[in-house]
Image (cartoon, rainbow, N blue to C red):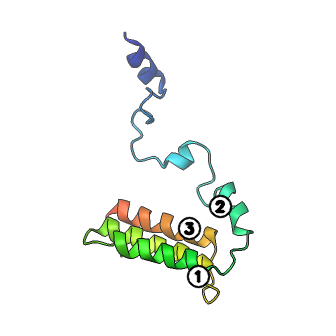
Amino acid sequence: MTGGEEREERGEDDGDGESPGDESADPLEAAGVDPVVPDSASDAAGEAFVDDAEVRAFLREVADDVRGDSSESKQLSAVLYRVSDLYDPDEVTSPEEIYLNVRHIMRIKEQGGIER
């Protein structure tokens, strides 16, 4: 029996980042990390973002540049616009809200769309 076969028989990770027979497991849950909000996002949510028109304009310019026909480029553009809202005094958002929104969108995309 090879080392890889022995690890697989014992149910151990074979070094490729996936556990045998568990291809659909959420990597955060598998790592024992709270999948809702990581500590770094919670800590950042308490920080204040000052009104910065230059940063806001730069982020929105980049968002316009990367927006294309693919769904991925549209998603990236939307995320950049959402991040730029942190620097807009007329918008109410936080890094935590942005993180949760993006994570939700990525999970829906991974599932192939919203199940109704």
* Mark 1 residue crowding within 10 angstroms, few (<14) / some (14–19) / many (20+): few
Please indicate, yes or no, whether residue 2 appears anywhere in the rendered image: yes
Name the residue that disc number 3 marks.
100
Could you tell me how far apart the alpha carbons at marks 3 and 2 are, in whole angstroms?
10 Å
Lower position in the chain sequence, tag 3 or tag 2: 2
Name the residue that disc number 2 marks.
41
As drawn, is 37 to the left or to the right of 48? left
Check the image and name the residue furthest to the bottom. Answer: 90
**Amino acid type, label 2:** Ala
Q: Say which element carries label 3.
A: helix
Residue at (31, 64) in percent of width and height: 112
Q: Is residue 51 above or below residue 113?
A: below
Q: Examine the image and state in which quarter residue 89 appears.
A: bottom right
As drawn, is 15 to the left or to the right of 91? left
Residue at (60, 83) in percent of width and height: 88
Marker disc for residue 88: none
Name the residue that disc number 1 marks.
53
Q: Say which element carries label 1.
A: helix
Q: Is residue 90 above or below residue 11?
A: below
For the image, the number of numbered tags is 3
